[in-house]
Image (cartoon, grey):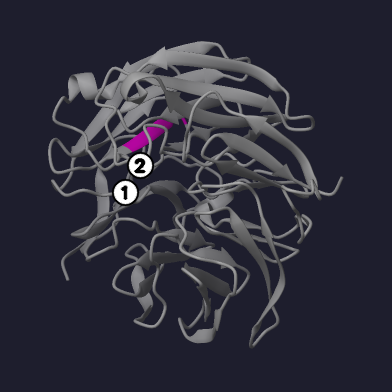
Amino acid sequence: MRTITFTACLLLIPMTAWGDDWLGFRGFGGRADSPQSNPPAEFSAEEGKNIAWRAETVGRGIAGPLVVGDLVIATSCGGIDERDISVEAFDAATGKRVWVRTLLALGRPFTHPTSANAAPTPASDGEKIFALYSSCDLVCLDREGGIVWYRGLGVDHPKTGSDVSMSSSPVVIDDVVMVQLECQGDSFVAGLDKKSGETLWHLDRPRVANFASPLAVPLPSGRQALFLSCSQSATIVDPASGEVIWETELDCKTTPSASVAGSTLVIPTAGLIAFDLTSDAPKPLWESDRLKARSASPVISGNRIYLAQGSVLVAGDLASGDEVWKQRIKGIGSQWATPVATQTGLFVFDDKGNCAVVKDNGDEAEVLAVSKIDGPMLASPAVSGDAIFARTENALWKIATK
């Protein structure tokens, strides 16, 4: 295993909590965990039970929503070849559309029918919104819907693209927004100035299709860095300069993404491998061939790791990597959406819009309810306050006690 050790070259960036905001793929820390939230376990689209609102989007999409202050943000696509790309903002309390901005995609919009040009979940720093599309177009907007800048990264890199989908989500660290655009053509990661959209750095990557998303990870000094995974390596990069500061050869999964909790980084491989981030050179903590991520990414909540494997849900111990329980969940099929953990329980959505809410009782799982919204649903949900915000192909839903 080839390893490059850390170098002391990162800016000091505090790890701060996001409160009720949900500012990126899987929320704060990429854990898909909101332990203070208490959404209702039962809901029904048909009966309207605990459905606070439903709002049609201007187009289709499989990107997860954001919650930025009092706004719910969604991306959509439509028109010929899904070249019309949109960002929409809805009032979180009422579901009323506040604004919508639509642009013309500059890059290749083609995807597999199960995917969409609006596939990557956007990111936000709480003030600006950064929406990335499979066409490799990246737009920055303010909270009023004003367009700050727009980059057609596929114009600069015409060999970057995939007919399946470019679905890796962006991440923001300090003043840099980073995109992971890895494919069999021109494959790279780039850091852009979040204020101007100017490219600050560019890092060539292996020419292999990759759908996993990058992740902000903490270092022993309290600084943040960018974690990248692909089928050849696990890498940590300085977000300011793009310098590789740690790398190890590792065959990482290319659909589910890594998760981090405190100083523990969990990476999907053929099973799972955990690294300890408390030293200058991260060291493996454990490796498990019983804990496996499929399409959905691992969820970390407390001392547990949860893995949705179709109709099977697995719980593992974060400290040891041991399997704690494994249980079949009736009424749930295959999923792409990563579940979310709340005080109520774990919300597990399948690709038809069925949702099981599962309570961890220590050595076994208890299914509290199985509910349904009108699918299909491939997007990972967001959590804010005591509400779940779910994105089906053509609509946004707020699941909350009425």
Vertical placement of 294 versus 68: above or below? Answer: below
Tell me whether circle 1 and circle 2 mark residues in contact (CB < 8 Å). yes
The residue that appears at 42% across and 14% down in the rendered structure is 103
The residue that appears at 36% across and 73% down in the rendered structure is 273
Q: Is residue 166 left or right of residue 44?
A: left
Residue 231 percent across, percent down from the top left: 21, 59
Image quarter of the N terminus: bottom left
Circle 2 packing at 10 Å, graded few (<14), some (14-19), many (20+), is many
Give, as a single range, the part of the protein colored magenta.
175-179
Residue 197 percent across, percent down from the top left: 37, 19
Please tell me which of labels 1 and 2 falls first in the chain: 2
Residue 388 percent across, percent down from the top left: 69, 48
Q: Residue 167: which disc?
A: 2
**Magenta span includes 177:** yes
Vertical placement of 6 versus 180: above or below? Answer: below
Q: Amino acid at mark 2?
A: Ser
**Magenta span includes 65:** no
Residue 181 percent across, percent down from the top left: 27, 38
